[in-house]
Amino acid sequence: MLKLRAHENLANTFWYQKENESEILLTLNYTPGHKAYDEKLLEIGGQEYRVWTPYRSKIVAALIKKLKTIPITPNSHILYLGAASGTTCSHLSDVLRNQGKIYCVEFSSRVIRELVQICEVRDNLIPILGDVRYPEQYRMLIPEQVDVVYSDVAQPEQAQIIIKNAETFLKSQGWILLFVKSRSVDVTKDPERIYKEQIKILKNATFTVVEVAHLSPYSEDHALIVAQWQK
Ligand SMILES: C[S@@+](CC[C@H](N)C(=O)[O-])C[C@H]1O[C@@H](n2cnc3c(N)ncnc32)[C@H](O)[C@@H]1O
C-alpha cells in the first residue's frame, strides 16, 4: 500500500512510503511539468510531487533526523546564502508557492546561470549574484527585512557571515538556519568544538540557539543550528 502524509511542520511537504520501503520526502511541485534538476517526479492522486533527498539538500537530512524547529511557513520571506544552482531553493519554492519569496544569493557566475533558469519558471525565487561576505553589495536588491536568513556556504567565517547578513536584512525576532561545515572552519579541529564555537559567536550576537541537528550520516561533519534573534 502507498502512504502519503503531510509533514508535521513544513507546508506542502509530505512523507511518502511504498510497501516494504522506507519513507522519503516529497514536495508538491509548484511548477507541474517542470523539473529543477534531475529529481524524480511522482504523480499521486492527480498531483505532481518532487522527490527531495538528504543527499541533495542538507535540510532534508535534518528533517529525517526529526528537526522540530522549522521557522519556514508559506508566507516566509527568506534570504538564502549560497544558493548554488538552486536545488534546495527549488524545494523551498514548493513550500512557499505563491505566498512567500526567496532571495537566492550565489557568487559563482557559472552555477548562477542554472539558478537563473529555475527562477524564470518559479516566480517566488529571485536570483542575486553577490558575495555573502559583503551584504552591502546586494543591499539595493533586497528592498525589505526578511523573516529568515538561511545559510549554506562553505566559508571559514560561517557564523560571522550570517550575523552580518542578519544585521542588514533580518527582522527583529527573525530566525536563522545556519548549516555549519566544520571542515571549512578548521579541518584540524574536532567538529563538536567547531559547532560550540559557532554557537558562542551567535549567542554573543544576541541569538538564542533553539535547536542543533547533526546531519550525519547524510552530510558528515555538518550541523544545522536554528536560532532566533533577540533584537
Ligand atoms: C554547499 S553549496 C550550496 C548548496 C545549496 N545550498 C543547495 O542545497 O542547493 C555552497 C554554495 O555556496 C557558494 N558560496 C561559497 N562562498 C560564497 C560567498 N562568499 N558568496 C556567495 N556564495 C558563496 C558556493 O559557490 C556554492 O555554490
Image (spheres, helix red, strand yellow):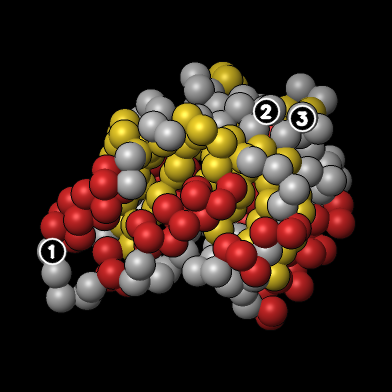
Secondary structure, mark 2, is: loop
> Which label is found at residue 161?
none
Q: Residues within 10 Å of mark 3 (few under 14, many from 20)?
A: few
The relative height of residue 50 versus residue 114 in the rendered view (above or below) is: above
Contact, mark 3 vs mark 2 (Cβ under 8 Å): yes
User: Residue 116: x percent and y percent?
Assistant: 79, 64
Alpha-carbon span between mark 1 and mark 2: 37 Å
Which of the two discs, 3 and 2, labels the residue nearer the N terminus? 2
The relative height of residue 218 versus residue 91 in the rendered view (above or below) is: below
Alpha-carbon span between mark 3 and mark 2: 6 Å
Q: Residue furthest bottom?
A: 110
Quickly name the residue at label 2: 74
Which of the two discs, 1 and 3, labels the residue nearer the N terminus? 3
Which of the two discs, 1 and 2, labels the residue nearer the N terminus? 2
Quickly name the residue at label 3: 99
Where is the N terminus found, in terms of image quarters?
Answer: top right
Where is the C terminus found, in terms of image quarters?
Answer: top left
User: Residue 134: x percent and y percent?
Assistant: 55, 69
Quickly name the residue at label 1: 190
Residue beneath the point at 67% across and 74% down:
111
Residue beneath the point at 44% across and 44% down:
177
Residue beneath the point at 58% across and 63% down:
135
